[in-house]
């Protein structure tokens, strides 16, 4: 059997350890061409534009 802790960890110590475990919201920016929200430094999945020019030809429905 593995060794067990001799004393119970306090709530404060446990919570300080978990202080960095929170999830953060993704940083989204609006596309300059179509206005769709997208991740920064990535090609817009809706219109295919990046930095003001078309990088990927997206088929229109």
Image: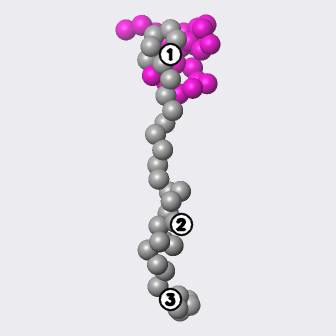
Report x, y in % for residue 29: 50, 23
Residue at (37, 8) in percent of width and height: 61
Q: Residues within 10 Å of mark 2 (few under 14, many from 20)?
A: few
Observer able to see residue 7: yes
Of callouts 2 and 3, the N-terminal one: 3
* Residue 50 horizontal side relative to residue 18, left or right: right
Residue at (42, 7) in percent of width and height: 60
Specify whether residue 39 is painted magenta: yes
Marks 1/2: CA–CA distance = 38 Å
Q: Residues within 10 Å of mark 3 (few under 14, many from 20)?
A: few
Bounds of the magenta segment:
37-61
Q: Secondary structure at mark 3?
A: loop
Residue 60 vertical position relative to residue 19 in the rendered view, above or below: above
Q: Nearer the viewer, residue 22 or 34?
A: 22
Nearer the observer: mark 1 or 3; the answer is: 3
Report x, y in % for residue 43: 57, 20
Specify whether residue 43 is painted magenta: yes
Residue 55 vertical position relative to residue 10 in the rendered view, above or below: above
Q: Secondary structure at mark 1?
A: loop
Q: Secondary structure at mark 2?
A: helix
Of callouts 1 and 3, the N-terminal one: 3
Residue at (44, 13) in percent of width and height: 35
According to the image, label 1 marks what residue? 31
Q: Residues within 10 Å of mark 1 (few under 14, many from 20)?
A: many
According to the image, label 2 marks what residue? 17
What type of secondary structure mainly makes up the magenta span? loop
Could you tell me if the residues under marks 1 and 2 are in contact, i.e. CB atoms within 8 Å?
A: no
Residue 32 vertical position relative to residue 11 in the rendered view, above or below: above
């Amino acid at each position: 059997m593995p060794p067990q802790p001799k004393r119970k960890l306090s709530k404060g110590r446990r919570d300080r350890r978990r202080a960095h475990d929170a999830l953060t919201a993704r940083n989204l920016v609006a596309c300059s061409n179509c206005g769709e929200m997208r991740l920064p430094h990535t090609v817009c999945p809706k219109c295919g534009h990046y930095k003001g020019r078309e990088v990927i030809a997206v088929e229109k429905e």
